[in-house]
Amino acid sequence: MTDPSPMTADAGGTTPAEEPYEKRWLALAVIAVTVLLVILDATIVNIALPAVSADLGIDAASQQWIVTAYTLTFGGLLLLGGRIADFWGRKRTYLVGAGGFAVASALGGLAQNEAMLFAARALQGAFGALLAPASLALLTVLFTDTRERAKAFAVYGAIAGGGSAVGLLLGGVLTEYADWRWCFWVNLPVAIFAILAAIPIVPESKAPGDTSYDIPGAVLITLGLASVVYGFTRVAMEAQENAQPGGSGESGWTEPLALLFIGGGLLLVAAFVVLELRTRNPLLPMRIVLDRNRGGAYLTSTFVGAGLIGAFFFLSLYFQQVLGYKPVEAGFASLPTTLGVLISAGLASALVPKVGPRPVMVVGGLLAAGGLFLMSFLDIDTGFWELAFPGQLLLGLGLGFTFVPLSNLALVGAGVHDAGAASAMLNATQQVGASIGTALLATLSVGAITDYFTDAAMSGRDPATDSLVGLEAQVAGYTTAFTWAAALLVVGALVSAVLIKATKEDLPTDAVVHAG
């Protein structure tokens, strides 16, 4: 076995390499496993929510905390996790993140009450916030040759874009044919394998130079991001509760506590930015965000995260509540998205080095938006092959073309010192975007459902005697969400077209990890 030598950097953040690290493709395979682990976990539990709630006696009002406990710690701790990876060692952070994620998953599967389950989910999010940026940072420093990096990020993009649909399928299979607890325990063998394989294969890397931690900045951004995510989550929860039979039908934006958390969180984030501009060794150097190409990539990532959450969340509801699919059937019905991603991720990896990232991202955003817009025409009796299949296939093709260059561009030029922070920023923008998208689309969906019931009543149709009214109202809500989700992806494509100026010549051509 050849041990990789420690990476070094000059003032610009890189030094020319003698030769690439010889086990980099094996390292990619190991890292891909844990990236999939984090992506799967975001959706695998969602489809098991009814079974979990029934078994542990969790009421409808508290059920959302199974998801929220994870998103709060994951979203809040991402930037700190990225800096820990840079300063403490990316491999070490990766191993601790994977091990902690496995322990938290085991505790979740053993949960005997809601408090134990919520605590396990929060712990999963905390260790996920170490694992996700460390994984992406390792890919960044292992692959800096233009063509090789494009291939590596094709793998990452395929997992990021298609993993959610696989999670729905796996969650459905485990819930229906095994037990909901296996939605947690399935992480154990995967994490153990990744740890055992990573120890001899994945090289260590650290940021050179000053590695002192920005503690005040870490506190501000952790509390700020967690507050923003929680505020938007409360908006979505309130909107969904108001849409239930007997609910007020009002949007969640009238909920004072939600607005307080959103406003307070934004103030904390603003204070964080001011502090980072004045701190000698900031948690998030503003040069990472203010670079036009990276800033454009992060903004695009926010809009993609906001629109994408609408696709999987509302489509899963449509399959199960309108078409009457079982969880496993809904999981299989979501696979066309993964098929599209697998096709386009490979094409994107070949196109980016030839034409640059911007054209691929713009086309990807428009394709994904077209897929969602196509699904806005779904009805209560629409056949799967008529709209859902082609719509999801288009969505998947677009996501593959978007995620591969997006992941690459968000890290270009960040340098060895800032790879973890830049990776964490990409993860954080997707997480915050998803929280905003959930709140926004849930609100719009509830409004459409309320309007449909009002119009039905005015036309003399009584939901109590006409069972179709309820289903039609649900479809009106879902299709409205698809329409606005498509609009968010179009905005993301426009942001890419306007802000991103990087060409194929701007992509890296030198490696920073070499065999010792």
Image (spheres, rainbow, N blue to C red):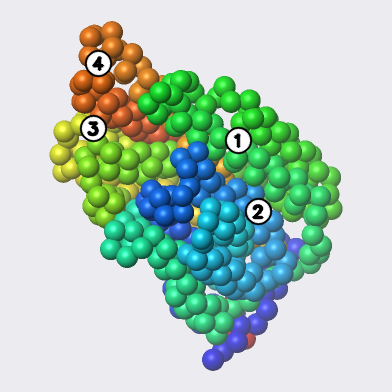
Q: Quadrant of residue 321?
A: top left
Residue occupying image coordinates x 80% and y 55% = 214
Nearer to us: label 3 or label 4: 4
Residue underneath mark 4: 462
Q: Residue furthest front?
A: 57
Give neighbour class at mark 3: few <14, some 14-19, many 20+ (Cα, 10 Å).
many
Residue type of the residue flagged with mark 4: Asp
Residue underneath mark 3: 378
Give neighbour class at mark 2: few <14, some 14-19, many 20+ (Cα, 10 Å).
many
Q: Residue furthest bottom?
A: 1
- How far apart are the alpha carbons under marks 2 and 1? 16 Å
Give neighbour class at mark 1: few <14, some 14-19, many 20+ (Cα, 10 Å).
many
Q: Going by the image, does 506 lie left or right of 358?
A: right
Q: Position of residue 267 (x, y in %)?
A: 73, 34
Residue underneath mark 1: 231
Q: Going by the image, does 227 lie left or right of 334?
A: right
Residue underneath mark 2: 77
Quick one: label 3 or label 4, which is nearer the N terminus? 3
Quick one: label 1 or label 3, which is nearer the N terminus? 1
Residue occupying image coordinates x 51% and y 30% = 238
Where 499 falls versus 32 (above or below)? above
- How far apart are the alpha carbons under marks 3 and 4? 23 Å
Where 139 falls versus 491 (above or below)? below
Camera-side residue of 444 and 113? 113
- Taking the image as drawn, is residue 106 in sight? yes
- How far apart are the alpha carbons under marks 4 and 2? 49 Å
Mark 1 secondary-structure assignment: helix
Residue occupying image coordinates x 53% and y 56% = 113
